[in-house]
Structure formats: C-alpha cells, structure tokens
Amino acid sequence: MIMKTYFCNCLRSGLLVSLLLTGALAGAAPTQEPLDKVLDRVTQRVSRFLDLFSDVKCTEQVTQEKFKPNGKIELQEQSTYDYLVLFTNVGGELSLAESRLPVKQATADRKKDISMLLSNGFATLFLVFHPYYVNSFEFSDAGAEMLNGQNARKIRFQHIRNTRSVAALALREREYPLELSGTAWVDPETGNLLRIEAGIASTLEDIGMKSLQSQVTYAPVTFHQDDLHRDDPVYWFPTEAVVEVETPKQHWRNTHRFTAYKQFSVATEEHVAQK
C-alpha cells in the first residue's frame, strides 16, 4: 500500500495532486543525543499519533492559486470543508479514508482555459516516520535549530530506491514512485513533529512535472483531559500544508489551513448471522 499522487494534464479537468494511503538552540551543549535515539522517539510518537489523528475532525480552508508566467496570480479560489481522516491497520496493512464535506464552495468565475491544482492528503506527510515506511528512508542529522522559539532537531530524509514508497505519480494508468526527500524539525525530547518539508528529489519533466514541493507546519492543540481518553491534554497537529507544483508551462500553489480540531469517533460492531 502506497500514497499516490495523481497527475492530470487536462486543462478542463485541471491538475490533481493527491496523496492517498492505499498514507536546537545555537548555544546548546556540543554533545547531542544520538540520532537513532531521537529517531526512535519520533517513530514511536508518530505511531501513537496515527490513532489519535483518526479520533478528531477539523475545519479545512483551502486557497488555490494559479500563477502567470510573470509570477503574478492569474486566478485564486477559496473553499472550506469539514475534514477528517480515518486510518485502519488490518494485518499490518495501513489504509486511509479521507473525508471532505463542503461548507463553502469556491465561487470564483473560472475561465475554461485555466486549470487548477487539486491537492489531498498532504497533512499525512508524518507517515515518513511511521514504522510502516521508516525503513524505506535514509535519515541523517542536520543539527539543532531554534524554530519559532522551540528547541528543534533537524532530520533529513531521502527515499531509498526500490523500497516501499510513500508517494507515487499516477499518469495514464501507470504509476511512477516518487523519490521524496526533505527535512523534518522535531522536538528531540518528546518526538513531536514541528515542521516537515518534502519534495521530489529528481525532476519528472519527461512526463510533464517539473517540481513538487510541500511544507506542513504543526502546532500544539489542547483538548480537555476527558477528551480522547489520553493522559496528555496537549498534542501537535497539522495546522498548515502548502503544496506547490510546476510544469514547464504552468505553476500552482495550494494552501490548506486546519483549525477547530474536535473529537470525532466512530464505533463499529460486527455480527455473525445465526443459521
């Protein structure tokens, strides 16, 4: 099971990029905790966060922008959705169901010859550090850095060829695994993700894509202690995901903002028919 990126070069239908799962301080002491220990802490945190992320819903505001060759905005559209992601893990295989219920549809008067970017699933880039995918990447220490007043450890990652891929480009009934690489900023003590930047390590201009870059920002969200049946009332959730795609002739940027996180749970029961 992989995360898929769908690419459509049709002007009328637009371009669809979709990730779907089928998934320190400058003055610090010179000696830092080994990377493998920090990475293990992040992996454990992401594994626990996966279940937590399925227990909440939020409001997603999407701003779609198409740029002219001179860099000015040619068209901008805004939409609002009720958003939730449900993960399941059956027999060690992860699956994802992403739900978007429109609250406010885009109202811009789109011209017939202008295509827009449709992007889904980028809030789940944390799966790079999930045990299901972590062995498909090489990780390296990029040192310590202050990020918005937070002591952070930078971890670079690079997908290993011929291993399980987090993302793939689906074009004309064929899939092209994406060699994602990037940098993650993490809290070295808790393992919480603070920010992830990821993109395509090599260009795919031969099939119509020049570049794909994304950035996901996380921030603490506080729940009541009785919510979610967890001991820790503060969690770090995606608050913004920016996706930028360029082809040799076109340039788009989508900004997803996630707010108003609330508890959401689904109870299921299985019954065996009596003969």
Image: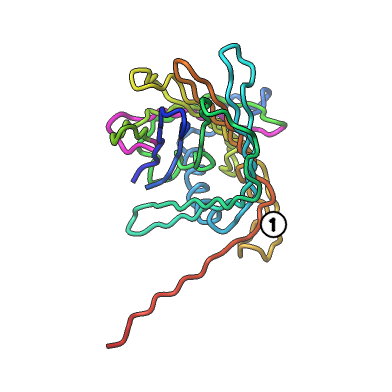
Q: Position of residue 253 (x, y in %)?
A: 57, 27
- The residue closer to the viewer here, 143 or 259, is 259
Residue furthest out toward the bottom: 275
Magenta span includes 172? no
Q: How is the image coloured?
A: rainbow
On the image, numbered disc 1 is attached to which residue? 223
Say what secondary structure mark 1 lies in.
Answer: loop
Task: Say which residue appears at 49% left-offset and 21% top-offset.
Answer: 246
Total numbered labels: 1
User: Which class describes the residues within 10 Å of circle 1: few (<14), some (14-19), or many (20+)?
Assistant: some
Res 143 visible: yes
Q: Position of residue 254 (x, y in %)?
A: 58, 32
- The residue closer to the viewer here, 145 or 269, is 269
Task: Say which residue appears at 38% left-offset and 33% top-offset.
Answer: 137
Q: Position of residue 105 (x, y in %)?
A: 63, 44
Indicate the quadrant containing the C terminus: top left, top right, bottom left or bottom right.
bottom left
Task: Say which residue appears at 64% left-offset and 34% top-offset.
Answer: 108
The amino acid at mark 1 is Phe
The magenta stretch is 149-167
- The residue closer to the viewer here, 207 or 213, is 207
